[in-house]
């Protein structure tokens, strides 16, 4: 079978660039061009920064099928991998590759080393700690002068404190790691800037692993240090795992807290129902799942490269061709979710792909879900008159990064 875009006279201008401008429409919605592609064809070529033309997959069914297919690889060292930006030396000290960009069996071997703290049982044991953090941050907000920036006062500190506790990282260093993580996730950071920030964080985490070798605690870095000492894991790999978990553990959840709050403030009837039924664990859980589906804050798309020819949806992805799976538009597929552009906190949205799908789905999703459930069941109950302290058009959205959200969210009550 021949691809519709394989003909020799296919003009380069007909291949749209990716990523696409999200600012054209509602800031909660995927770019309009993705909607058009989803209606017209589930697979289409797009052009990246380097001139390469990988396949963009926009429909939910094809996305799940490909993410679960062992014939595509997550390894960025494979020729044809659709890198979102220029990459530095994969063997540099600050390399972020770690296990999330590896294939099985090495991916599975390394992932198993850090799964224990993220099991549902272990995560639920942390709930009282998370509840205390949430309440303490709300207490501080209520004594502060209004308006308050919800991002700075609440959305960032809560997941930062949680991941620091889990990893064994001093929270006193949070400004340091948040500053460097912003450079790493910023779309316009140069290769040199991103590499330097990764190297700085890797050096910092390596120092902490060294401390845990001599003075272990009850935390994840101590567990990794024990594996270093036993010879199961190189110390450098342990520090890279620490970098990955530290960044992923606060950037994504922080943006979800703030953006989710904004979405609920713009849906006052649903916010009122959630506030009045904040003790209803099922409604709180469905609210979290629906916001994860509706907002989906990672907008670079999951990147893969075909290892073999794959026939799907009337096209053939050839071995060595790149694949991009933007789950934000997949989560708005009307074949998977009725009225997908409508926020509905009563919807059963548990089959969304905000955390990915297949063997590489997000390791920390039980922790993220628990944190969001505590936040969404507490914040609006304790501050029932919470409202924006500015007009929506004055809010700056993160169109310049790989993790989407708002820079600031001024609120009052």
Image (tube, grey):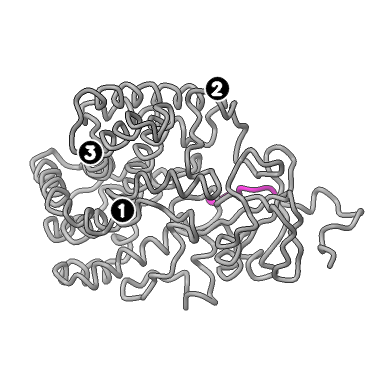
Crowding near pointer 2: few (<14 within 10 Å), some, many (20+)? few
Would you say the residues marked 2 and 3 are in contact, meaning their CB atoms lie under 8 Å apart?
A: no
Q: In this rendering, which labeled residue sits more in front, label 2 or label 3?
A: 3
Q: Position of residue 63 (x, y in %)?
A: 58, 64
Q: Is residue 315 left or right of residue 259?
A: right
CA separation, marks 2 and 3?
A: 32 Å
Q: Comparing marks 3 and 1, which lies closer to the viewer?
A: 3
Residue pointed to by mark 2: 192
The disc, 1 or 2, on the residue closer to the chain's N-terminal end is 2
Residue 408 - label: none
In the image shown, does 64 or 181 lie closer to the viewer?
A: 64
Say if 319 sits above or below 50 in the image.
below
Q: Residue at left 51%, top 75%? A: 336
Q: Return the x and y of residue 123 as percentages of the image width and height.
A: 23, 54
Compare residues 139 and 78 and report the one nearer the observer. Answer: 78
For label 3, count other residues whose C-alpha is less than 10 Å away and answer few (under 14), some (14-19) or many (20+).
Answer: some
Left or right? Give the position of 80 relative to 230.
right
Residue 134 x %, y %: 16, 48
Q: Earlier in the sequence, mark 3 or mark 1?
A: 3
Q: At 72% across and 56% down in the image, what residue appears?
A: 308
Q: Is residue 61 above or below residue 323?
A: below
Residue occupied by mark 3: 219
Badge 3 vs badge 1, beta-carbon distance below 8 Å? no
Above or below, 378 relative to 395:
below
Residue depicted at x 79% and y 54%: 14
Point out residue 391 in the picture as x, y percentages from the top left corner: 34, 50
Q: Which element is circle 2 on?
A: helix
Look at the image and give the residue range highlighted in magenta. Answer: 17-22
Mark 2 or mark 3: name the one nearer the start of the chain: 2
Which mark, by number, is residue 368?
A: 1
């Amino acid at each position: 079978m021949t691809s519709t875009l394989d003909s020799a006279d296919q003009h380069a201008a007909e291949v749209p660039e990716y990523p696409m401008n999200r600012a054209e429409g509602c800031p909660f919605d995927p770019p309009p061009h993705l909607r058009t592609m989803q209606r017209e064809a589930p697979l289409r070529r797009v052009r990246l920064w380097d001139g390469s033309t990988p396949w963009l997959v926009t429909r939910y069914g094809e996305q799940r099928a490909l993410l679960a297919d062992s014939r595509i690889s997550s390894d960025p060292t494979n020729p044809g991998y659709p890198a979102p930006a220029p990459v530095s030396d994969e063997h540099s000290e600050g390399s972020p590759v770690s296990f999330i960009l590896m294939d099985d069996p090495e991916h599975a071997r390394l992932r198993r080393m850090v799964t224990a703290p993220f099991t549902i049982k272990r995560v639920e044991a942390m709930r009282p700690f998370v509840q205390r953090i949430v309440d303490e941050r709300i207490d501080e907000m209520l004594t502060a002068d209004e308006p308050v920036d919800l991002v700075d006062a609440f959305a960032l500190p809560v997941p930062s404190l949680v991941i620091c506790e889990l990893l064994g990282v001093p929270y006193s260093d949070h400004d340091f790691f948040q500053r460097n993580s912003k450079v790493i996730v910023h779309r316009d950071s140069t290769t040199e800037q991103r590499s330097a920030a990764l190297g700085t964080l890797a050096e910092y985490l390596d120092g902490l692993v060294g401390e845990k070798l001599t003075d272990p605690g009850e935390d994840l870095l101590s567990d990794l240090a024990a594996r270093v000492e036993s010879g199961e894991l190189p110390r450098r790999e342990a520090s890279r795992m620490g970098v990955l978990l530290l960044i992923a553990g606060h950037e994504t959840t922080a943006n979800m807290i703030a953006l989710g709050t904004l979405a609920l403030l713009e849906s006052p009837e649903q916010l009122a129902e959630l506030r009045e039924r904040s003790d209803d664990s099922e409604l709180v859980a469905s609210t979290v799942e629906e916001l994860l589906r509706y907002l989906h804050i990672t907008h670079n798309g999951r990147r893969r490269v075909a290892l073999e020819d794959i026939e799907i949806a009337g096209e053939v992805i050839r071995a060595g061709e790149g694949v991009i799976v933007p789950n934000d538009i997949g989560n708005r597929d009307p074949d998977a979710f009725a009225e997908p552009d409508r926020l509905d906190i009563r919807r059963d949205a548990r089959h969304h792909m905000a955390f990915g799908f297949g063997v590489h789905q997000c390791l920390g999703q039980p922790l993220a879900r628990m944190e969001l459930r505590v936040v969404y069941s507490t914040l609006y109950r304790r501050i029932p008159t919470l409202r924006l302290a500015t007009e929506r058009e004055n809010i700056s959205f993160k169109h310049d990064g790989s993790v989407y959200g708002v820079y600031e969210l001024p609120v009052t009550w």
